């Protein structure tokens, strides 16, 4: 009997080790966010929602700008709109003694909007129930707190691992079929989703705009700040123009007030290829990240 229990214990320990290893593997390589919560503190950041997470590649920016420190710390429309939670996370992710960093902030109407009865009521902000509300450390490896609090989504992460890859520099690579029929279908679905979930229920938030200002002011102490509006498909742009027709004017005024550059690529949106009308496809020319890098490089001359 004792031999049986010993064998059972050994077998159980082996299963536990294998299960732990698989869980860690799924979070480390299949999760769209985990590695951003385990990497060290950074000196230069790309910030925004999933458009920036997928559309701006630090590797290319570092090459164009002759740097080696740019890191993508962008998340999603639900988790990282501009607000107190995101600003707090940015402060935790940035090294304290930085004074020559580069900070690229992606803006769009959705990152400055909120749902609920009052878009300026911070108690209704979506990120209060998102990633930043469940994790206190952004630089711990392994981050057991993150794994424990997101364990219930393990099956989703297993499916996700087949088409997403979060690189060590924070860039989220998404690989999906790029046949024209698939692109059209995904774009139609995405625009419909934004109409129903965001355009119909969200409103522009002056509180979020003020948090964007606070974020800019904080980062200006640590280097140069650039505001960018990442291009989307004509259909998505039409929706955004209907939702917030004076968005570029609002951001231009903010940029002018804070004495930082702002560029929108919406007038050039037909140049680029999109996976779903909302996110840029990475493997195409012209490459958007190169264009951002060359724009910044020109401003630095």
Image (cartoon, grey):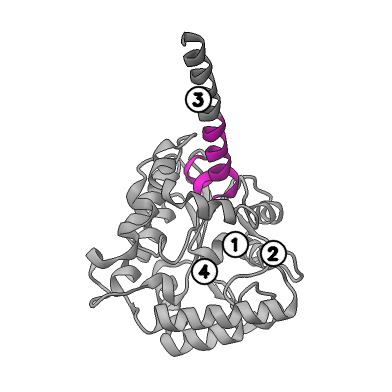
Q: Is residue 175 left or right of residue 136?
A: right
Residue marked by disc 2: 282
Mark 2 Cα shell of 10 Å, populated few (<14), some (14-19), many (≥20): many
> Which residue is the extreme one toward the top?
2
Mark 3 Cα shell of 10 Å, populated few (<14), some (14-19), many (≥20): few
Percent of width and height locating residue 265: 60, 77
Residue 281 drawn above or below residue 26: below
Residue 301 drawn above or below residue 95: below
Indicate which disc, 3 or 1, sits on the residue closer to the N terminus: 3
Residue 225 drawn above or below residue 148: below
Identify which residue, 4 or 241, lies in the foreground: 4
Disc sitting over residue 212 in the figure: none
Indicate which disc, 4 or 1, sits on the residue closer to the N terminus: 1
Disc sitting over residue 12 in the figure: 3
In 3D space, how far apart are the residues under numbered discs 4 and 3 (Cα atoms)? Answer: 59 Å
**Residue 245 can be seen in this image:** no
Residue marked by disc 4: 261
- Quadrant in which residue 78 is drawn: bottom left
Identify which residue, 266 or 31, lies in the foreground: 31
Percent of width and height locating residue 14: 55, 25
Residue marked by disc 1: 54
For the point 67% across and 52% down, the residue is: 59
> Which residue is the extreme one toward the front?
1
Mark 4 Cα shell of 10 Å, populated few (<14), some (14-19), many (≥20): some
């Amino acid at each position: 009997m004792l031999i049986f229990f010993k064998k059972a214990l050994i077998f159980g320990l082996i299963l536990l080790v294998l299960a732990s290893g698989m869980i860690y593997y799924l979070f480390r390589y299949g999760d769209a966010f985990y590695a951003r919560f385990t990497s060290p503190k950074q000196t230069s950041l790309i910030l925004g929602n999933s458009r920036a997470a997928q559309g701006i590649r630090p590797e290319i920016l570092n090459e164009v700008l002759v740097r080696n420190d740019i890191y993508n710390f962008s998340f999603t429309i639900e988790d990282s709109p501009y607000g107190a939670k995101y600003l707090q996370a940015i402060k935790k992710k940035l090294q304290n003694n930085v004074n020559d960093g580069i900070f690229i902030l992606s803006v769009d109407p959705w990152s400055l909007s909120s749902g609920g009865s009052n878009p300026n009521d911070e108690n209704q902000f979506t990120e209060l129930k998102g990633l930043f509300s469940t994790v206190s450390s952004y630089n711990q490896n392994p981050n057991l707190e993150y794994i424990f609090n997101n364990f219930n989504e393990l099956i989703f992460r297993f499916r996700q691992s087949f088409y997403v890859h979060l690189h060590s520099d924070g860039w989220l690579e998404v690989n999906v079929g790029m046949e024209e029929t698939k692109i059209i279908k995904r774009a139609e679905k995405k625009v419909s989703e934004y109409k129903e979930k965001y355009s119909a229920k969200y409103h522009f938030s002056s509180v979020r705009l003020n948090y964007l200002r606070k974020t800019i002011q904080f980062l200006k102490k640590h280097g140069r700040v650039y505001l960018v509006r990442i291009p989307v498909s004509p259909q998505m742009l039409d929706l955004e123009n209907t939702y917030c027709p004076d968005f570029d004017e609002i951001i231009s005024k903010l940029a002018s007030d804070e004495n930082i550059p702002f560029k929108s690529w919406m007038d050039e949106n037909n140049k680029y290829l999109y996976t779903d009308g909302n996110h840029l496809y990475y493997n195409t020319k012209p490459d958007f990240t190169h264009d951002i890098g060359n724009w910044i490089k020109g401003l630095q001359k």
